[in-house]
Each structure stands twice: as structure tokens, then as C-alpha cells.
Amino acid sequence: MRTDQLTWAHKARGGLGPDFFNGRSWAFGQSVLDRGAYGWDGGLGRSWLVDPTCDLTVLVLTQRMF
């Protein structure tokens, strides 16, 4: 669940611009960063991130939209 599931062909055709996938990719339902961190930013103010190299877990719950 924490490994890159996109091929270079997928990355070339998707994203929000030509550099969107620099340093990041997509796993099963979550964003994966090249440094090993993974998580998700939800559309209604919920975010979470796990960074195993820093032994860090972040959970942010807000009641406002971005």
C-alpha cells in the first residue's frame, strides 16, 4: 500500500501539470512521497501523514473547507 503504483506512462499523461509527480506518486488510495512518507489530504479539512523515517504521525481534523 505504500509503494508507487503508477508507471512512467501514467505519470506522463496525468497530474496537474508537467511537474506534478516530481517527488511523489500514488499508491492504493493515498499519496506516496519519494522520501517514504505517505498520507492523504481530504477535501473537507481532514489530513493525515505518516513519515516512518522521522517516526512521525500527523492527523489534522478541521471543520472548514480548504
Image (tube, rainbow, N blue to C red):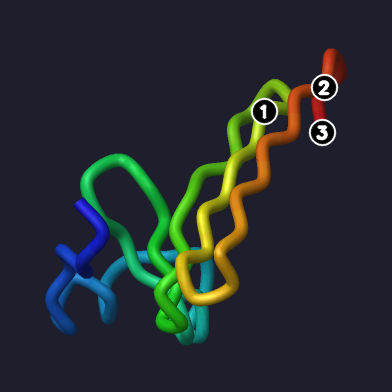
- The residue type indicated by label 2 comes to Thr
Instruction: Please tell me in which quadrant of the rendered image residue 66 appears.
Output: top right
What is the spatial separation of the Cα atoms under label 1 and label 2, in whole angstroms? Answer: 6 Å
Q: Disc 3 marks which residue?
A: 66
Q: Nearer the viewer, residue 41 or 1?
A: 1
Residue at the image position 45 percent from the left and 72 percent from the top: 33
Residue 62's disc number: 2
- Residue matched to label 1: 46
Query: Which structural element holds mark 3?
Result: loop
7 with respect to 11 (left or right)? left
Q: Which mark is residue 38?
A: none
**Residue type highlighted by circle 1:** Arg
Identify the residue shown where x is 59% and y is 72%. Answer: 54
- Residues tagged 1 and 2 counted as in contact (Cβ below 8 A): yes
Q: Quick one: 24 or 1, which is closer to the camera? A: 1
Numbered disc in front, either 3 or 2: 2
- Badge 2 crowding class, 10 Å Cα cut-off, few under 14, some 14 to 19, many 20 or more, is few
- Measured as percent of width and height from the top left, residue 34 is found at 41, 82
Tell me the crowding category of disc 1: few under 14, some 14 to 19, or many 20 or more residues within 10 angstroms, Cα based. Answer: some
Residue 64, placed above or below residue 28: above
Of mark 1 and mark 2, the one earlier in the sequence is: 1
**Which residue is rendered at x = 61% and y = 58% of the image?**
56
Count residues near mark 3 (Cα–Cα under 10 Å), then give few for <14, some for 14-19, many for 20+.
few
Quarter-of-image position of residue 45: top right
In the image, residue 5 sits, relative to residue 49, either above or below, namely: below
Residue furthest toward the front? 55
